[in-house]
Structures are given as structure tokens and as C-alpha cells.
Image: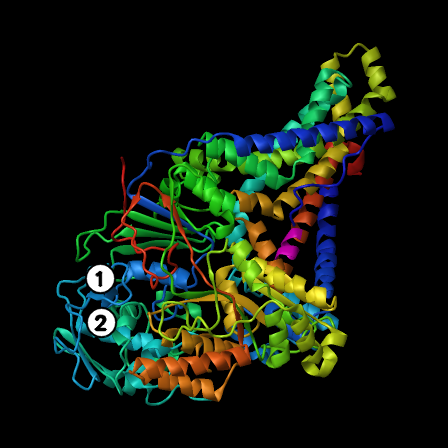
Amino acid sequence: MHLEKMGRLSSETEAEEASSSRLKVLGRAVASGLLSAAFCWPRAAQALPADTGTFTELSISGIDSLDPAWAYDGASEEIILNIYETLFAFDKSSTVTLSPRLAARVPSRRNGLISKDGRTYVIPLRRGVTFQDGSPMTPEDVRYSLMRFMLIDRAGGASGILLRPLVGYDSTRDKDGKLKPSAWRDASRAVEAGRDRIILHLPKPFAPLPSILASWAPVASRRWAAAHGDWDGSEKTLAKFNNVEKRGTWFFDHANGTGPFRLERWDRQAMEVVLRRHDRYWRKAARLSRVIVRGVNEFETRKLMLEAGDADSIYAAWQVYEQVKALPGVRVVENVPMIEVNPMVLFTYHVRAPGNPFIGSGRLDGDGVPPDLFADTDVRKGFAYAFDYAGFIRDVSRGRGTPANGCIPKGLLGYDPKAPLFHFDLAKAREHLRRALKGALWTRGFRFTMLYLAGNDERGIICRMLARNLASLNPRFRIDVRPSEWPAFLDASLSGRLPAYPDAWQADYPDPHNFAYPLMHSHGYYPKAQGYRDAEADKIIERAMSETEPSRRRKLYARLIAIEHADVPHLLIEYPSNYRTQRTWVRGWVPNPVFPESPYGAYYYPMWKTSS
Amino acid sequence: MLRFIGRRLLFLPLVLFGVTALLFFAVDFLSPEMRAALYVRSPRQTASVEAVIEKYGLRKPLPVQYGVWLREALRGNLGYSETARMPVADAIREFFPATLELAIAAFVPTVVLGVFLGVLSAVFKDRWLDQATRFVAITGYSLPSFVLGLVLLMLFYGKWHLFPPGRCSLAVDLAIHAADFKHPTGLLALDAILDGRWDVFMDVARHLVLPAATLTYINLALLLRVTRSSMLEELGKDYVRTARAKGLPESLVVGRHALRNALMPVITLSSLLFVSLLGGVVITETIFDYPGIGRWTVMAAQELDIPGVVGTTLLASILFVIANLCADLLYAVVDPRLRT
């Protein structure tokens, strides 16, 4: 193990010890001097990029998977959407207007490509598109990709986004976790490949479908996948790939899309992905020849690399805003539109207990927590009142965020600025926690571990604020706070092993359903892992999804938010307002709140670096 | 000498048995469910924990469990690390070479400079050279590695763009991942020499300078001061006085007679220092964005990744035993009386 310092210096005589301590003081003074000099030394930022063809983005995490049907996190999706392409794309910064990408046209009722009953979509496909391995893209590839996206359906994955509109249910597995016998047939019936088009048959109208297809189910080559032992698209081999483990697919660490960049390398050890320009791209080839996305957890190192010109954009939070704002040659883009709930703290109602080191003893004995601690409403409410929301927004987010009062963020239908909020109120927190578990929680105390994404200091602060406030109520309340690398964090949280953890949700597509479902529906992304279920909430979400009348839909979401406030399955802290930090030589970045990792991540096709 | 080495090597399995047994019994206080991850090669297997517990007898008497664990460990199955997202043995293979490279790059200058300056300091006791080395030692000792690392990075990278962080530059990164670049050792600098790629070697060396300098400066203090004390003790002994009285040149008195005897504590300390460097230099690796074993070790500890922690501890223990063996052999080289 690391020591980096070993033992104490031995001294020969008392006189020498005295002399040593004088020198130590001097040594420390020199150290402080050096540090101040290094901080204050005027550093000339690199004025021109050394290499205008290569773009380097420094983030704080590695990616989880490159499989477009498996990955469901921003870091992975950012890379995937630079390699693969979807049928449509959001037009520049718009979250409403779509433009065709692999499709030749965007279907609408006006152009007759959506049937009058809203249940059939005809999507003509672009011709002359080739995959990065040189093979042509066919309608069969598009059908395969849509089906694969639905049928891989790994637990906690994104398949439900497309399953619901195309086959009418959210999971391909029954209550016992077995693959439904009709799953392949249903998906196959829903997606039909024509000669130069794809036809989608919906069980009932689903208005946000084109928006979903602008971010999800990017097109991959069926032949390439089958040749490498991945799913071949047949019913016979589906069972092997349904709910497949992360590394169980060829797509996990290989890629072959039609997009502007091809995968050159994914170095998991160095948390680095290198993309190279796809020279035979169907549009004009990208101006950047190479894109590097790398996880560097230490902010000071990221900052120095940005200054030196070795990085073109970096992840920077509000705590370091003044530092990056003052850097010469660096541009800070503020007021970037965002549709997300970030951060929030999620409670797991039934923690997976066997072999779980995050719940200590696993009992309510002061050295652990029982697996169902957060199934008690008073515990959750006690936590909700023990967090200083206003203080967090004021001090950590520099007053830029909006207090979050419901799962539907600002900017979407259903957001209600007047909905009730939780406030920091230690008296109320004490009241609830005293009542929790019939008083046993207060007398015995608890201890568990909260993990947060390493490098994301804001989330670390949230955990520590909660830990400190709860400990101030009762010293027997102990939370150990630890950072974790992104993929390991995802594995632990989604497998239900973390009792409580901070996370965030960014829009997959700009519709309230995309927040209501993953945050509140029992089959949604978080509730499934949390074990949260409210029958009324489920019904409301399903009704609101097919409701076309905005006022009625708004009412349904108002009721949902009331249930959310009463149940407290999570603490919602803020609708954020982030900023992007990039070198002034960077051109062409287009903000879009729906693009993964926005505003830190980017779609690199339109971007370039100027040499002047 | 051969008999001495043989005897020492005979002890090795016994020591390793002690180390592994101690480590195994230390984690035995954990529940069988938690220890199950020590036996699996894939996270899928942990879905059926009971089956793993049954298969590897995790509820059987301790010696039986130890036997099973040791057998699995000897087969290279050290469990699955959640933090590294791969089997522990694979993770060690992935991360260790980078750390070994950094450790060597820091260790050699530390020992050379530490001994050299320590001897000079003793010979010129209380003169300006002694004061200067003491100053170097104490400033090095006073500086936390993250402060020194950041200062060096700000000056030599931020200001002068000389030594960048990371393990290599982009161009070299692409070159070493090309099919024609062979990785027989995993140590980039050595592989570059073996491949005859001096451009790669120079680039890797350039990236090693700052983290190695940080570690050298911080660890130098201890070695320098121990060498000085040991030398002062030897220089005051009768045999040195006799050697001087015989008219031997001072360089021989110091270099051949006193230094040889003064080296014993230096060897002990150096072996410990090398092991501590190999065990992972977390802060230095983090600041310099150097993907070594230290970062993984810390993440494993923070995330309560039992197989990761046990694997890295086992590695550190084995390295410690080997370093001790090397130190014993070096003692014998330095002092022939120990060979009997």
C-alpha cells in the first residue's frame, strides 16, 4: 500500500533535533512559498492549438459500455451517438424540431407518413449509407437494430423506451424473469422492413416516438454482429441475449456504426476512448480527424491540461467556476439549456443484502442498517428534512439552479412551480426519525455507506451534508461517504446494493413521460432498482402517456407530483443550470439539452478547431 | 553463498504460508456472502451466492476453507473485482506494470542520490554541504506529495510545457496500440527499447519525469538521513581510525570500508521503500493521471470491494516477502559473516 511518506527521521542528538525542527519550519515555509509561487506564477496559456485535427475532452469518468442496446448512461451514450446514428436527429439546439438522419424524411401526418390513426409510421431510408466496415446499410439492418434495442432488454436498461410504444409493454420478461414467448414475435410484427423503408406498427398512438428515435436505437450492422457471435436477429438465439450481462455482447467493446467517427480504441484502464474520423461517411467527412474522451478525476490536472492546450474542453462544476472563468484562452458558455433533475438522492426500499458491504451488519444494531430501512416513510421524510436544499443551491451551485419540487423539470409540460417543496428543517427531521421503525432507529442508530461518482464533488458534498446533518441530530446516525468510479457505481446502484445514493436524470427525449416513468413508475429505471411501487402512480403515468389533451395531462402529472411528495422515494434537489468550459479555438459546438452529457459532452461532427 | 541462498529460499514457502494464512483469517470475520466474491470469476456468479458458498465450502471449518482458497489462488483465481470490473488476477496484470515502471523510475534515483548525499553529508558533517542536504531532506519530508506534485505540474507542465501528465502522449499512445508494437513486459519504456522505438522511449521517459521526481524528492529524505547516521557511526569506529592511521586514502576509507558497513540499514530501508512504491502511490498517480495500481487499490478500499482489497494486499505481502529476501541476500553480499 501507498505510504509516500515513511516513518520519522531519526535524530542523533538533542541539538540536532532542535536544529532539525528549525529546519522543518524553514522547509515548510519553503514549501508554502513554492506553492504560492506556482499558483501565482503568471502562466501563459497556449495561444494556438498544437493539433487542430484532434479534439480532447476531459471528463470525470470512464464509460460503461459501447453497446447501443445495453448502455443507458450519459457517458457511454455520448460516445455511442458519435459512432452510430439514429433515424432522426434533433435540429441543432431544438428539442422539438427533428431532421432526418438515416431516414430520408421525418414522418408526419401532413406528409402522410404517419397514418391517420397514428399507429403506422412509414420511414423512408436514406440510400448510399455505409457502415464503418464498408458494408452498405440496409432496411434489414434498421429493423435488426430496433428489434435488438427492444429485445436485449437488460435489467435497468433503456429497452422499455421503445418497447412501450412499439409492443405495448415495458419488459420482455414475465414476473418470474422468464422471456415472454411472444416477445420476438411482437417486436417482429411491430417493425417491418420494406425495400427502401421501415414501417412501424404501433398498438396505440404514441406521440413522442419520433423524438425517441432521434436519440435511441441507433443502427448497427446485423451481418457484422452475427459474424462476431452476437445476436443474429433470430428467435432461436434470442434467449441467450435477452437480459445479457454487460460483457456478454460483441458490441460491449467493439463498434461499427454509420456515424461520423469510428472507434479506434477504448482503454478502460486509462478511462479513455479514442475515435477516428469515418472517412467514407455519407455526409461530408467530419472536420476533426480524431476525438479523445478521457476521464481525469483531478480537477487541477484537467485545468492544467486545458491551459496547456492538451485538452479542448473539460468538465468543471460551479465550485471552480471562478477559476476556469479567469483562464486566458478559455471560453465559458453559460446559460446552457438543460432538461434534467440533477442532483437527487435515491432511496432503495429493499436493499440486496447477501454479501453487501454497504449496509454494515445488515441489522439495526448501530453498525448497519436492515435491508428495508428506507421502506419506512418516516426514515425517508427524516432524510428529506435533513438536507439543506437552499444552502446547497446558494453555496455549491452558486445560486444558479432552481429548487426541484417534482420529477418533471422546468421546461416540460407538468412542471409546476407552485408544487410543494421539502425544506431544511431539523426539527421535523428529528420528529420523523424518532418515529421511524417504532422508535428503534432513534435508540439504536444506523450506519451505512453512500457512494457517489468519483470526481463529481457536488455529489460528494450532498452525501457529506446529509451525513453531517443527520449526525447532528443523533450521533448514532452514521453515514460513510465514499467515491466510486462510474461503471462500478452503476453496477452497485442498479443492482439494488446501495441504501441511498446521489444520481441525476437527463432527458432521453423531451417529454414529461421520460421523467415520470424512470423516476416514479414501478418498472422505471430507478424504482425498479429501488423497489418502489405505488399502484396509483403507475396508473397515472400510463394514463398521462396516452393522454393527448395538455390540460388533462397536466392535471395527471400534478397528482403524480403530490404522490411523489407524500412517498418521498427520492430527494430532488435542483433543476440545474450548468456551463461548458472549452478553449476559444473550439468552433461549432451546438448545445442541445437532450444530447448525452450536455453541456460537457458533445456531438463532434459539426465541430472544429481554428488555427488562427 | 549458495547454501545461504538455498536456506533463505527454503524459508520462502513457510513465510508465504504465514502471510496468506494471516490474510485469509483476517477476512474470515466477514460473512460467507461477502467472502463469496473471492471465488468467482464473473459478477454473474454472485447472483447465486448460495451456490458459490456451497461449492467452495465457505461454511466449513477454517483450515478447509483456507485450503480451498489457496488452491484457487494458486490457479490464478483471486475473485472478481467490482471496481476494476474484471477478475482480480487480470486487474493486477493490467495495472501493475505501470506502477512497477514508475516505482523503478523513482527508486533508482532515490537510492543513488540518497546514498551519495548521505555519505557526503556524513563526511562533511556540520559543513555547508551537510546543512544543504539536511535542508533538501527536510523540505522533501515536509512537503505532502500532492503539494509537491501539483507545484511541479504547474511549473514544469503548466508554465514551461516540459513534462506532461499521463503515461504517454497521443502520438505515442497510437503507436503503442498499433499491431507492430510488441508488449512483452508491459513496461512501456522497456518495451520501447526492446522494439527499438526510441521515440516511444523518450516520450514515456518524459512522462515519467515528474511523478518520479515527486516520489524521489519525498522519499529521498529518509534514505539520506539514515545513510548519514549510519555513516557517522561507522566513521567513528576504531577500524576506520586504524585504516586512516595506516595511511589509506580517504576515498578508500570512506568508499570501501565505512560505506560497506553502513549499508545494512540502507538496504533494509530501500527494500521497504521499493515495496511501498510498488504497493501503489495513489496521490502521485491521481495528480499525474498515471493509471497504476494505487488508484485501483484505493477505489477497491473505498468501495468495499473485498476481492480487490484482498488481491492487492496479497500482492503487497508477496512483494514484501520477496523484497525481504532480496535484502537478506544483499546483506550477505555486503557482510560475508552473514553467509554462514
**Helix, strand or loop status at disc 1:** loop
Q: Which residues are magenta?
A: B312-316
| Residue sitting nearer the eye, B322 or A376 | A376
How many residues crowd mark 2 within 10 Å: few (<14), some (14–19), many (20+)?
some
Residue annotated with mark 1 = A131
Q: In the rendered image, is residue A100 in sight?
A: yes
Which quadrant of the rendered structure holds the N terminus of chain B?
top right
**Helix, strand or loop status at disc 2:** helix
Relative to A399, is A540 above or below? below
Residue at position x 23%, y 50% in the image: A286
Residue annotated with mark 2 = A141
Image spot of residue A23 (x, y percent): 74, 27
Main SS of the magenta part reads helix
Answer with the quarter of the image where residue A54 lies.
Answer: top left
Between disc 2 and disc 1, whose residue precedes?
Answer: 1
- Are the residues flagged by discs 2 and 1 from a single subunit? yes
Query: Which mark is on residue B89?
Result: none
Q: Is residue A471 left or right of residue A252?
A: right
| Residue sitting nearer the eye, A356 or B103 | A356
Asked if the residue under mark 1 is in contact with the one under mark 2, i.e. CB atoms within 8 Å, the reply is yes
Q: Is residue A290 left or right of residue A118?
A: right
| Residue sitting nearer the eye, A83 or A419 | A419
